[in-house]
Structure formats: C-alpha cells, structure tokens
Amino acid sequence: MGRGAGINGVLLLNRLLLAGCFLPAAIGRAANISGFAATLTMKGMPYGDVVATVVVVAEIFGPLALALGLAPRLSASVLIAALVVTTGTLHRFWDYGGLTRQAEQAVFLSHLGVLAGLLFYILTGPGAWSWQAWWKGIGSSSKPAKAKKRQPSRPRTPKPRPAPARQVMDDDELADAA
C-alpha cells in the first residue's frame, strides 16, 4: 500500500505550500495582536480579543503541524475554522464597492482556494514523508519481505466425501411397490 516517491513528494509540497499561506499573516497578527483584536471587534465579532488570540495560536501552530504532517485532520480542521472566521469577518467584499470590492473579493476567493487545499489534505492525508508516517512506521524499508506461500511437500489426496444418506422407505411404500 505504499505510495510512490512522486506522490509523497507532491503531498509534502502541498503541505509546505499550505503552511506558507498561513504563516506570513499569522506572524503579522502575532506582532500586533491587539490591533487584530480591535479590527475583529470593529467588524462585529463578539469577544474579539479571545477570538484573535485563538486565531493567532491556530495560525502559528497549525501550519507547523501541517508542514510536519502532525495530526493531519486536527490541524487542518483548526486551520479551516480559523480561515472561515477571518475570511467571513475581514473580507466581506459584498459590503464594499469599486476597487476595494475587487481587492476584497480576490482575497476572499483565494481563501476559498486555500480552504479547498485543506479539505483535500484531510482526505488524502500527509503521505509517507511526514511525522505521522514516521511514527506509525509507514514507508520504512525495515519491514520484512512478504513470504511466499509454502507449497505442501507431497501432493495430498482429497478426503473422501461421505455417501449421501438414503431415504428410508416406510412399510406402506414397500407394500405399494410389491
């Protein structure tokens, strides 16, 4: 069930590219978390400071787990939740007009692409070049080769089958036959 090196390379590249989508924004938000919290609050997000803290933690540790292939479904799910919160709150392009609308719509649609990548990551998993595969021993060359099925040393004769049971005739049937 091992995947080829090409597929594992593509899965690794996918993980690294998805992680790269989150880290620059996360580092900027972590450097000014109070400003990010204020922005969320101004956009109508209740408990903006708590949400900002959770999003920043998710956007810092999620991509690291993503790049390493650690807890793939959990890390992708957390990143999807953070992405939905930030995209739905900060990039509401339908509230704007003109060039601002176009810019916000482009960011919104690019976030949908990242969301699609995370959904595919949930479905495919991290591949053999990941922490999870290393931990489970997937793709290691130390596994013994599959042994061939042993042939019997001498041909075996089939066991005889029992004869079918004969039907016992009643006395009335015997009398009718005579």
Image: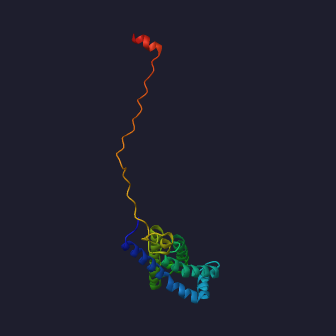
Residue 115 visible, this angle: yes
- Quick one: which residue is furthest to the front in this view? 153
Q: How is the image coloured?
A: rainbow
Instruction: Work out whether residue 66 or residue 113 is closer to the camera in this orientation and state it.
Output: 66
**The C terminus lies in which quarter of the figure?**
top left
73 in relation to 40, above or below: above
Where residue 150 appears, as percent x and y from the top left, is 38, 54
Instruction: Work out whether residue 169 or residue 64 is closer to the camera in this orientation and state it.
Output: 169
Instruction: Work out whether residue 172 or residue 160 is closer to the camera in this orientation and state it.
Output: 160
- Quick one: which residue is furthest to the bottom in this view? 31
Q: Quadrant of residue 39?
A: bottom right
Image position of 35 (left or right of 125): right
Q: Quadrant of residue 141?
A: bottom left
Where residue 89 appears, as percent x and y from the top left, is 55, 78
Where residue 86 appears, as percent x and y from the top left, is 54, 79
**The N terminus lies in which quarter of the figure?**
bottom left
Where residue 130 appears, as percent x and y from the top left, is 47, 75
Residue 104 visible, this angle: no
70 in relation to 35, above or below: above
